[in-house]
Amino acid sequence: MRNGWAPRSTGRGGSRTIVCVAGNEPPDIVLAAYGLAGAAAAPLDGGNAWATRAEPQVVLKRRRLPGSGAGADWEAELRRQAAAAGWPAGGLVRAADGSAAAAAGGETWTCETWLPGERREVRSVAGWRILGRLLGRLHSDLARSDPGTQRPGLGKVWELDVLTEAAGAGTFNRLVAAFGERYPDLAASIRRERYRNLRELARLGYPELAEQPIHGDSSPKNLLWTSGELTGLIGWEFARRDAAMCDLAPLLMPHGPLDLPHAQALFEGYAAVRPVSNQEFGILPALVRASLLWQVTVLLIRWRLLGDEPAGVARTMLGRFPVFERYALELGALRANVRG
């Protein structure tokens, strides 16, 4: 890719560090599972990460969902295929017993190869156009390595029962019902958006869209850069088979709506590499709503199983959904201006 932004594989070098990304220090049982028993841990990133001296460099991560390690082998193979295509995807390091994930205290951990680079915000039209091109190229490369089978423990963006049951939280409806015992108004809004979203996705032909491997959490926060080059593509926990637009949709509503000039640049960059059909473009607002419901479901699972506070659920249902309704009306006007 031009302008020095092409993905490239990276080697090892420098000090050898284990970076443990999580809300709490990794338990001894996890360190032992990866042959790191007794390693001294020091906090990084304001207490959200830990580092110890080790050889070679690796990253320990607590997965956002308990039980989400069920598909770690599938993820490991997809990352291997992405690396073979030139993407700095890293790899999963096996535990001493050969497994791709370790469990402790009802949560799941993985160990990954360390990747250099720093996150950076995307603030310019040119930056969003480049991000679109990168995502289009990633989708083209992943499509060529499609395993043809879904990742264990995950489903398509509207298959929320797969997500909740794999985590041990029961069906989606039962999870919402339990939430409704304490927060009835929020639960009612979740049900309302869920049923609406199912109807609109079916009406717009989501089941007929081609499926392929997707990253599952496309975001600038999961890109690492070194001197203008992409040196890390991280955050593969929700990688799965789905419509390619399910990676593009969340970029339109990370927290608030993406500025329309940036959204247009994102579409243009993406379409220049992977053409987007009118049907795919037209279904994007529905997929944004589906991605918001997916995020709410993750928060509900953590509330149910780990006791997390439901503030994030309230912010999404009471804030992000209403804001997106106004924004969705503006997205349609962009299609005529997108060339690709």
Image (tube, helix red, strand yellow):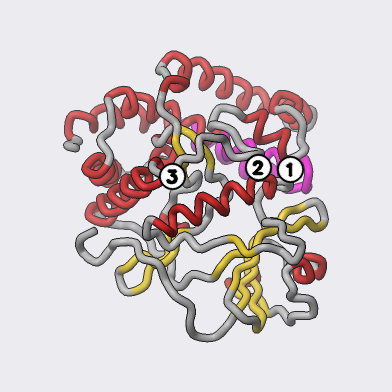
Q: Is residue 188 left or right of residue 125?
A: right
Q: Residues within 10 Å of mark 1 (few under 14, many from 20)?
A: some
Occupied quadrant, residue 331: top left
| 255 and 87: which is toward the camera | 87
Closer to viewer: mark 2 or mark 3? 3
Residue 65: image tag: none
Q: Are marks 2 and 3 in contact (CB under 8 Å)?
A: no
- Mark 1 to mark 3 CA distance (whole Å): 36 Å
Q: Amino acid at mark 3?
A: Ser
In x, y percent, where is residue 154? 61, 37
The residue sitting at 48% across, 30% down in the picture is 289
Question: Is the Cβ of the residue at disc 2 closer than 8 Å to that at disc 1?
Answer: yes
Quarter holding residue 327: top left
* Nearest the eye: 106 or 112: 112
Q: Is residue 325 magenta?
A: no
Tag 2 secondary structure: helix
Mark 3 Cα-neighbour bin, 10 Å: few <14, some 14–19, many ≥20: some
Report the front residue among 89 and 105: 89
Left or right side of 58 for 288: left
Q: Which mark is residue 145?
A: 3
Q: Which residue is mark 2?
A: 299
Can you give x and y, in whole percent of width and height, for residue 258 in the image?
36, 44
- Please determine whether, in this image, residue 44 is positioned above or below residue 76: below
Q: Is residue 261 visible?
A: no
Q: Which residue is mark 1?
A: 303
Q: CA distance from mark 2 to mark 1?
A: 6 Å
